[in-house]
Amino acid sequence: MFVAQHLILSAYGFWLPNDPRGSGSNYVGSDALFDIAGRAMKVEDGRSRAYDAHDRTARLAAKALLKLPPVLFTGVHARAIGRGVATHAEQAAIPMWACAILPDHAHFVIAECGRDPDQVMQQFKAAATRRMLAEGVHPFQGQSPVPKCFAQGGWKVFLKADAVERTIRYVEDNPIKAGLPAQKWWFVSRETSVERGPTKDTPQN
């Protein structure tokens, strides 16, 4: 029985749909990317492929063909993303058990709440985007129309009870492994209800 979900959202340009290590995408939307790196490499087993051996030169050559520079979120972006996701999670009654927002991707562990994880990921990205635009910090702020700063789709892993603590530790350790400060977000709680009092405006780092 699954009790939680580990969701991973990528910033634009972080993980291409035809990355040789596999991806969460079904198709390649750019002819140039398809020509240089082939079809999408969708995988479903949930295993992390971040450290898989691959042709790094070919991967970087494909990234050079992107229409826009890869997005790198700063601390200001991360704070706005957290605010947006927190607002949606509270409104939708989605308990959040872990969160880490890094420069090129973000991790969330949510309790099983009967919602389609693909839909939840789309809603998280939409909420984060609205908040960044409202605060004037979207990476592509000022362009019209504003390009998306998140990649299509995302990774999802369904967790059984014996995998929850290990996954939470993995998410919490991600910033530290990347050389960043540990993150402690106000909207993360192991309580089963999201009704935890007033929502704070800033993360505790």
Image (tube, rainbow, N blue to C red):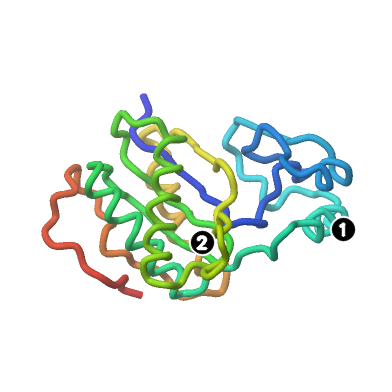
Residue at position x 32%, y 62% in the image: 83
Hey, which residue is sitting farthest top in the picture?
1
Camera-nearest residue between 113 and 11: 11
- Identify residue type, mark 1: Thr
Q: Is residue 187 above or below residue 91?
A: below
Residue behind mark 1 = 57
Report the side of 131 relative to 189 (left or right): right
Camera-nearest residue between 39 and 171: 39
Label 2: state its secondary structure: helix
Residue at position x 19%, y 42% in the image: 192
Q: Is residue 39 above or below residue 68?
A: above
- Identify residue type, mark 2: Asn
Q: Is residue 177 visible?
A: no
Tell me where residue 112 appears, x and y as whole percent: 32, 34
Residue at position x 39%, y 36% in the image: 162
What quarter of the picture does the N terminus occupy? top left
Hey, which residue is sitting farthest left in the picture?
197
Residue at position x 57%, y 36% in the image: 46
Hey, which residue is sitting farthest front in the picture?
144
Tell me where residue 142 appears, x and y as whole percent: 53, 70
Q: Write down the quadrant of residue 148 in the picture.
A: bottom right
Tell me where residue 114 appears, x and y as whole percent: 31, 28
Label 1: state its secondary structure: helix
Q: Is residue 107 above or below residue 2?
A: below
Residue behind mark 2 = 174
Camera-nearest residue between 74 and 174: 74
Numbered marks: total: 2
